[in-house]
Amino acid sequence: ASPDVTILSATMSACFRGEQWQMAVALLAEMRSKALMIESASFVAAMGGLQQAGRWQDVLELLNEMTHQNADRDLPALGMALAACARSSRWREAISLLGKGCEVDAVCLLLAIAACERA
């Protein structure tokens, strides 16, 4: 990864931990505008902030964008998307995510169950 990507990814993670999701999303937009190769960790940081803000649709859009950017749709990304669905009682979306692209673990299954329970 280039120094720009590494620095921006680390900053995005700090924004997520500091509950500054708007800044994390703005940094992701900056990475796009610079045509930088966006790593999975950057997507996950932005998704985490959006998930905390209850913006499940934006989280799912980022998960889809990961595929278009050739970023790995890994377990943390899937977990964030499932958490967003669970938080917003979007059980259909959560169930549909389980069959798309990566192996699931017990946490992912529990998040999908939580989405169903809240519906």
Image (cartoon, rainbow, N blue to C red):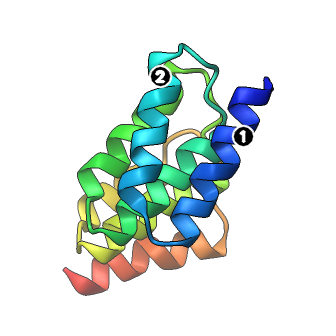
- Secondary structure at badge 1 equals helix
> First in sequence: mark 1 or mark 2?
1
Q: Which residue is mark 1?
A: 7
- Decide if residue 48 is in sight here: yes
Q: Residue at x 72, y 40 (%)?
A: 7
Q: Residue furthest left?
A: 119
Q: Residue at x 43, y 69 (%)?
A: 83
Q: Residue furthest bottom?
A: 117
Could you tell whether 9 is left or right of 115 in the image? right
Q: CA distance from mark 1 to mark 2?
A: 14 Å
Picture quarter containing residue 50?
bottom left
Could you tell whether 65 is left or right of 109 in the image? left
| Badge 1 amino acid | Ile
Could you tell whether 81 is left or right of 103 in the image? left
Q: Residue at x 30, y 68 (%)?
A: 53
| Badge 2 amino acid | Arg
Front-most of residues 93 and 52: 52
| Number of other residues with Cα within 10 Å of mark 1, as a class: few under 14, some 14 to 19, many 20 or more | few
| Number of other residues with Cα within 10 Å of mark 2, as a class: few under 14, some 14 to 19, many 20 or more | few
Tell me where residue 30 appears, x and y as whole percent: 46, 29
Front-most of residues 65 and 9: 9
Tell me where residue 1 appears, x and y as whole percent: 80, 26
